[in-house]
Image (cartoon, rainbow, N blue to C red):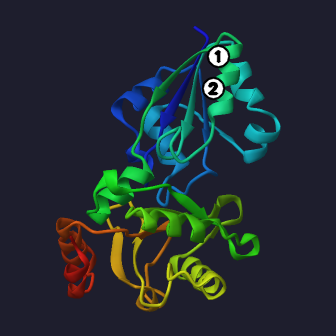
Amino acid sequence: MNELVFVGLGLHDEKGISLQGLEETKTADHAFVELYTSLLPNFSMERFETLTGKKAQVLTRQDLEEQNGARILDAAEKGKTVFLVPGDPFIATTHVALRIEAEKRGIKTRIVHGASIISAIIGLSGLHNYKFGKAVTIPFPENTSETPYNVITQNKKLGLHTLCLLDIKTEEKRFLRINQALAQLLGMEQKKKQGTATIQTIAIGIARAGSNTPVLKADTIENLLTYDFGDPPQSLIFPGELHFMEAEALIALAGAPASLRGAAK
């Protein structure tokens, strides 16, 4: 059967794949994996292939973006093909074009969802999911943009929290860190002066969500600049208006200053 199944790998290592995803991989005629859109800190291809009994071909960004996923599509026209993607296949990555092209070719597509970095970060923080506004990615300094600052500002005006994903280039083993992202926002604050990201602004830093040793710390930007979050991947949240239970969660779970209770509603 010509079929393309998108399978989420989860967030940390080869054990993050679901039982359904494992079964789909074991029964596939062809298996492909990409590991450039997100970092799986403890993923081992050798252990994964032992677990699944399947040899997976690793694809590069060029394979998928410049060659339009031709290798995957050609394989899927010949038999059941699994495409393994970090996290949840269509949340933090953009492989929609590949799925559309498969359907145009008459290839049936299905999705086996995996744990998403979006839900993992929000769950760790203790903040209410429905109070998050638009998310944004903070780029590396050489590609600095006003967009993250503007998105945080707009969300705050609406009382909403902002999830900030930090840029990565896995091929180069480069990962933007929390202190670098905060330094960019402080620089933008100096230009725009809207009170969005001052040294006294409360932010929440998260590292290695989905692992057994995540780090969660809520404090002023001034203090977060020197806090050691350890290894990547890392992310940021800028809270909007806090419900009193959200404030209590940040104090209990993230070591936020007790004074945060006074800002809650």
Seen in the picture, residue 263 relative to 97 is either above or below; the reply is below
Q: Would residue 139 be visible to someone looking at this image?
A: yes
Callout 2: SS = helix
Q: Is residue 257 left or right of residue 84?
A: left
In this view of the protein, which residue sits in the foreground, 255 or 27? 255
Seen in the picture, residue 180 relative to 99 is either above or below; the reply is below
Tell me the tag on residue 103.
Answer: 1
Tell me the tag on residue 99.
Answer: 2
Picture residue at 50% right of the left edge, 78% below the top: 196
Picture residue at 82% right of the left edge, 40% below the top: 66
Amino acid carrying label 1: it is: Glu
Seen in the picture, residue 97 relative to 62 is either above or below; the reply is above
Q: Is residue 202 left or right of residue 44?
A: left
Residue 137 in percent (x, y) is at 58, 61
Number of numbered discs on residues: 2
Tell me the tag on residue 147.
Answer: none
In this view of the protein, which residue sits in the foreground, 143 or 25? 143
The quarter holding residue 160 reads bottom left
Callout 1: SS = helix
Amino acid carrying label 2: it is: Arg
The quarter holding residue 221 reads bottom left
| Disc 1 residue crowd, few under 14, some 14–19, many 20+, Cα 10 Å | few
Residue 10 in percent (x, y) is at 43, 46
Picture residue at 39% right of the left edge, 45% below the top: 115
Picture residue at 33% right of the left edge, 68% below the top: 213
Whether the residues at callouts 1 and 2 have beta carbons within 8 Å, the answer is yes
The N terminus sits in image quarter: top right
